[in-house]
Image (spheres, rainbow, N blue to C red):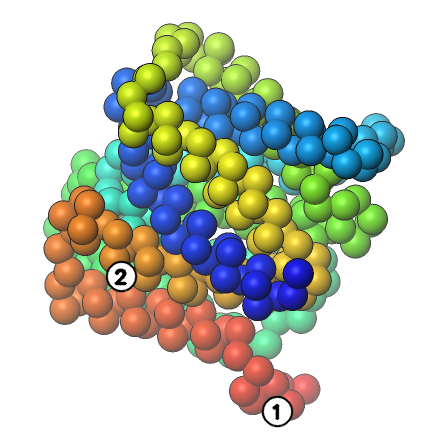
């Protein structure tokens, strides 16, 4: 599969997955929904590996690095994101997640030795300014109890954990760990951590048999997890965590559009201007224009 196709798949499934996360909220506690999602996704991937005869034998060291990928990417960040969607619309959560473009570049430089160029600083400034415009009413009021400020804070923390998982995946692929098997075991480790979190907190084990919950669970496990992460992490291995994150430039627009129809999100001129600034900032970070002048 070529990179353009992988981009298209990632954007399509992740642009709509935020609404799926929103549909998970209700009877089932958020952390339990995360556990259900990745238990199912891990089982599907491991079963696929077994049927295809793909190797499932890795050293303890390799398993440690797979866990380093899986715990922040398939557990911690999703637990936090599920809570964040309880405080603001899924489209705004997706918009905040788009800052992973900038975070990936800085963490890639710090942990993988990738170069940071001047345009990254400009893109980061535009992205931060855009977020400030989107959340301007809450920032002006600056009430720590404001739902959207709480949601913003949670989303930014979750995005940081997701970025750490991205960098770990890039490292693992450099070390020769295949994407499919790495995701299969990574999701299994993430599911184990989330299940342990559920048990330690004493969260009641319940299940919602409604069509909305079951349908969103299947969509999130099969499309957003198995297919979406497979496409996205393959891109990371091929072109690096900075340029792979370019997909996050587009899917917040899809997510906010869905929020307009399904969550009654109200666009304001400031919110629209903020979204445009975030998208421009991400494009500035990733564009090839001016690269030859950056040394």
Front residue (pair 128, 17): 17
Q: Which mark is residue 132?
A: 2
Residue 216 x %, y %: 37, 33
Q: Residue 95: in sight, yes or no?
A: no
**Separation of marks 1 and 2 at Cα, in angstroms:** 30 Å
Front residue (pair 59, 221): 221
Q: Crowding at label 2, few (<14), some or many (≥20) Cα neighbours within 10 Å?
A: some
| Residue at disc 2, secondary structure | helix
Q: Residue 168: in sight, yes or no?
A: yes
Q: Which mark is residue 63?
A: none
Q: Which mark is residue 293?
A: 1
Q: State the image quarter where residue 25 is shown.
A: top left
The image shows a total of numbered marks equal to 2
Tell me which residue sits at (37%, 14%) in the image: 207
Tell me which residue sits at (81%, 37%) in the image: 54
Front residue (pair 221, 91): 221
- Left or right of residue 15: residue 36: right
Indicate whether 193 appears above or below 21. Answer: above
Circles 1 and 2 in contact, beta carbons < 8 Å:
no
Residue 31 x %, y %: 42, 24
Q: Quadrant of the N terminus?
A: bottom right
Residue 86 x %, y %: 26, 34
Q: Residue furthest front?
A: 51
- Left or right of residue 79: residue 225: right
Q: Crowding at label 1, few (<14), some or many (≥20) Cα neighbours within 10 Å?
A: few
Comes first in the chain, label 1 or label 2: 2
| Residue at disc 1, secondary structure | helix
Residue 278 x %, y %: 35, 67
Tell me which residue sits at (57%, 40%) in the image: 226
Tell me which residue sits at (68%, 47%) in the image: 169
Q: Quadrant of the C terminus?
A: bottom right
């Amino acid at each position: 599969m070529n990179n353009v196709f992988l981009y298209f798949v990632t954007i399509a499934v992740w642009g709509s997955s935020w609404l799926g996360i929103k549909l998970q909220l209700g009877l089932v506690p958020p952390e339990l929904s995360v556990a259900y999602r990745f238990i199912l996704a891990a089982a599907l991937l491991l079963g696929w590996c077994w049927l295809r005869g793909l190797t499932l034998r890795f050293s303890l060291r390799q398993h440690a690095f797979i866990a380093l990928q899986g715990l922040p990417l398939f557990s911690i960040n999703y637990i936090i994101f599920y809570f964040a969607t309880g405080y603001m619309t899924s489209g705004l959560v997706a918009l905040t997640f788009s800052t992973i473009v900038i975070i990936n570049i800085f963490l890639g430089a710090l942990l993988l030795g990738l170069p940071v160029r001047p345009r990254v600083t400009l893109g980061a400034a535009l992205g931060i300014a855009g977020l400030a415009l989107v959340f301007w009413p809450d920032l002006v009021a600056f009430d720590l109890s404001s739902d959207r400020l709480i949601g913003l804070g949670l989303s930014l923390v979750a995005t940081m954990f997701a970025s750490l998982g991205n960098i770990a995946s890039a490292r693992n692929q450099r070390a020769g760990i295949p994407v499919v098997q790495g995701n299969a075991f990574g999701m299994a480790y993430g599911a184990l951590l989330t299940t342990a979190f559920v048990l330690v907190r004493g969260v009641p084990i319940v299940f919602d048999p409604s069509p909305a919950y079951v349908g969103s669970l299947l969509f999130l496990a099969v499309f957003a997890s198995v297919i979406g992460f497979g496409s996205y992490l393959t891109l990371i291995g091929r072109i690096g965590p900075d340029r792979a994150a370019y997909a996050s430039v587009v899917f917040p627009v899809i997510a906010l559009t869905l929020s307009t129809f399904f969550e009654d999100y109200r666009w304001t001129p400031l919110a629209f201007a903020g979204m445009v600034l975030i998208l421009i900032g991400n494009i500035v970070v990733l564009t090839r224009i001016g690269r030859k002048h950056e040394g």
